[in-house]
Image (tube, rainbow, N blue to C red):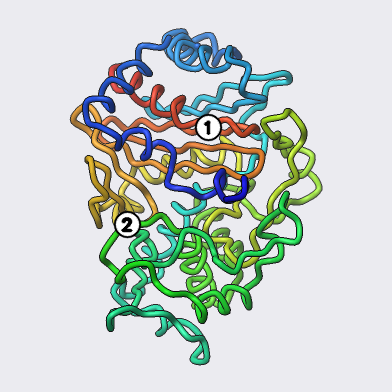
Amino acid sequence: MTRFAVEFYRLPGLARQLMIDPMRRGLYLLLLTSCAVETPPPAEDPVLRDLVDAAVRPFVETGKYRGLAVGVLHGGRRRVFGYGSPPPDGATIFEIGSVTKAFTGILLLQSGLNLEDPIRKHLPADVKVPSRNGKEITLLQLATHRSGLPRLPKTLAPKDASNPYADFLVDDLYHELETSELESDPGQAYEYSNLGMGLLGHILALRSGNSYEQLVIERICRPLGMGDTRIALTPDQKRRLAPGHLSSGAVAPNWDLPGLAGAGALRSTVDDMLRFLDANLGDRYDGAHVRRFDVGEGLSIGLGWHLLPYQGATIVWHNGGTGGYHSFAGFVKRTRTAVVVLGNSTTETDAIGVSLLGLLQNVR
């Protein structure tokens, strides 16, 4: 499998690491939360400053991160911490990759559509949709990765491997559906699928009469005051975009996903993501966090979001990765705490996010 297929849109790294063994999972989280953290928050909050530094510094000192923007929501207050040279801030823009899927799940919740609708009902009549053993794919199955569709489009043949989805358009998406053979009966098994979530984003946009980006702006960003969460960037936003970096240290080209926008096309900032997570801590999007399917070893999935039990509570989370970026967004409703970590390198940010969330549970 090519590098871009391996590094982008796979079963989220946190899930893979924490599903191995329940005992190992507990040890992993214990080690993370015992790690003790560069740019401090306001001086009037030294406890939070020290906590964040204790969690983040060990990761930064590995030298594997180019830049990190870390956002924390705790006690009703939002704080942003920057690491790197120069350190990013709350207005620095990053590709957030598969964290986009959480937005897609919320758009489905808001759509008012019947989650059990077969997807053929919402696609053009001339588009052939695969089925298996007489079972059809539903909207809910797309949102919970149980459609039977493959992880990546099998017909994906990028002209430029450094921007692998740029030439995969809606017509290619329809061709993929017409030629796909489902890997399992719809509803039978969990198989993380970027194709499926990209298809869901397309269906929701098609139903609304807008592009996926415009749908996100109108339904989520504008009501929450998120002016920097976009696909297409303005000149000012491009100036604030942190360049992604490959593992070699070279600057990575940005990625475009015209045919699969709902799977990972969004770009955002820590400031915007904290607004988004704050809204998720309330009851506005509750239906997206309801357990819809148990994946195994305690992990379950709602509409786009993954759910993981931890210390008697539940971490609701998603991560993402594109060619030169990694992201993590998660929260615990019981304690009204949330963390977002955005990085512009190929090194995963999951462990930082989980570590911070764990530490915040014990801070009053």
Q: Nearer the viewer, residue 160 or 280?
A: 160
Classify mark 2: residues with Cα within 10 Å, few (<14), some (14-19) or many (20+): many
User: For the residue labelled by badge 1, is the local secondary structure a helix, a strand or a loop?
Assistant: loop
Residue at left 79%, top 39%? 239
Q: Is 92 placed left or right of 69 in the picture?
A: right
Q: Residue at x 25, y 32 (%)?
A: 21
Residue occupied by mark 1 = 348
The residue shown at (42%, 80%) is 130
**Given the image, on which type of amino acid does mark 1 rest?**
Glu
Residue at numbered disc 2: 190
Q: Is residue 74 above or below residue 268?
A: above
**Residue 364 visible here:** no
Q: What residue type is disc 2 on?
A: Tyr
The percent position of residue 339, horizontal first and vertical second, equals 44, 31
- Marks counted in the figure total 2
Q: CA distance from mark 2 to mark 1?
A: 23 Å
Counting from the top left corner in percent of width and height, residue 27 is at: 28, 20
Which residue: 63% across, 44% down? 95
